[in-house]
Image (spheres, helix red, strand yellow):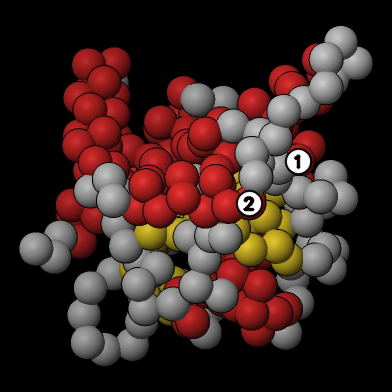
Amino acid sequence: MLKTELELRQDLAAAYRLAAMLGWEDTLYTHFSVRLPGDGEPRFLINPFGFMFDEICASDLIVVNLDGQVVEGNADYNPAGFTIHSAVHMAREDAHCVIHTHTLAGMAVASCEKGLLNINQISAEFHGRLGYHKYEGVAFNLEERERIQDSLGENIALMLVNHGLLSVGETVADAFQIMYYLNKACEIQLAAGQMSGLSPITTISDELATYVSEQFKKVEHERHTVWKAWLRKLDRIDDSYKQ
C-alpha cells in the first residue's frame, strides 16, 4: 500500500533522527530524500539546508522537483545534494528513497583502491550489488548526474570513491537498512585492517559471497520489521520528528 505524504515525511524525518543517533551526520551536510507519490511531475522530499539531523521534523522537509525548484517549503537545499539525489530519482523508478552519508568508516573504505572486501557475512550481502562512482569533485555539476546513474546501474548501493556511501530502496525502511549494513561492513573492514599486522585477514571467495548475497535477498522483507523496531526505539526517546 502506498504511503501518504505525511507518512513519508515522518519516515524520512525518523531516518534523519536515527542517523544522528548512530553518528552518521556531517554537521549540515549529506542528505536523504524520498520521492512523493503522484502521476504528475516527479517531486521529492529532502532536508532543508541549515538543519542538524537531530532537529529535523516532518514539517521541515522541503519539496523539490527535478529542475531544482523548491515547490513547497521556505528553505533552500544543498546543491551537491540535489545533483546526487535527482540523478537517482530520474533514473530509477524503484529508488523511492535515497540515503547519502559521509561516515568515517564509509569514507575510509571509499578511499581504498579495492573498495569493499568480502571479509565478513555482512559485506558478502553487497557482493555484485554495489556500484562504484569515480570522484569528480564536489557534485555541483549537473552533467555528473548521467555518470552517477551509470555507476549505480541496478545496484542497491553505490560507493562514491574518495567521498562516501549511498543506498537506494523502494521505501525509507529499505534504504535505511541497506545503509546501516553497508556502513557496518565498512566498520568491520576498518577494524580488520587495524588488526592485519597481527594476523592476515581471511576473505570469502566470490563464489561463496554470491551464494550469501542470494541468501540475503530472500529475507529482504525483514527490513520492514526492523524499521518498525527502530521507530519504536525512536518514539521512546523523542517522537517530535513526527511534527
From the viewer's perspective, is residue 53 above or below residue 217?
Answer: above
Residue at 77 percent of width and 26 percent of height: 201
Indicate the quadrant where residue 45 lies.
bottom left
Residue 56 visible? The answer is no
Compared with 242, 167 (above or below) is below
Residue at coordinates 9% horizontally, 63% vertically from top-left?
Answer: 1
Q: Residue at x 48, y 81 (%)?
A: 90
Q: Hey, which residue is sitting farthest top in the picture?
A: 198
What's under tag 1, amino acid-wise? Val
Q: Judging from the image, what secondary structure is the residue with disc 1 in?
A: helix
Q: Which residue was labeled with disc 1?
A: 109
Residue where numbered disc 2 is placed: 206
Above or below, comparing residue 128 to residue 58 in the picture: below
The one nearer the camera, 119 or 29, is 119
Q: Check disc 2 and give the amino acid type.
A: Asp
- Looking at the rendering, which quadrant does residue 150 occupy? bottom right
Left or right of 205, for residue 11: left
Image spot of residue 46 (x, y percent): 44, 58
Q: Residues within 10 Å of mark 1 (few under 14, many from 20)?
A: many
Q: Position of residue 85 (x, y in %)?
A: 54, 67
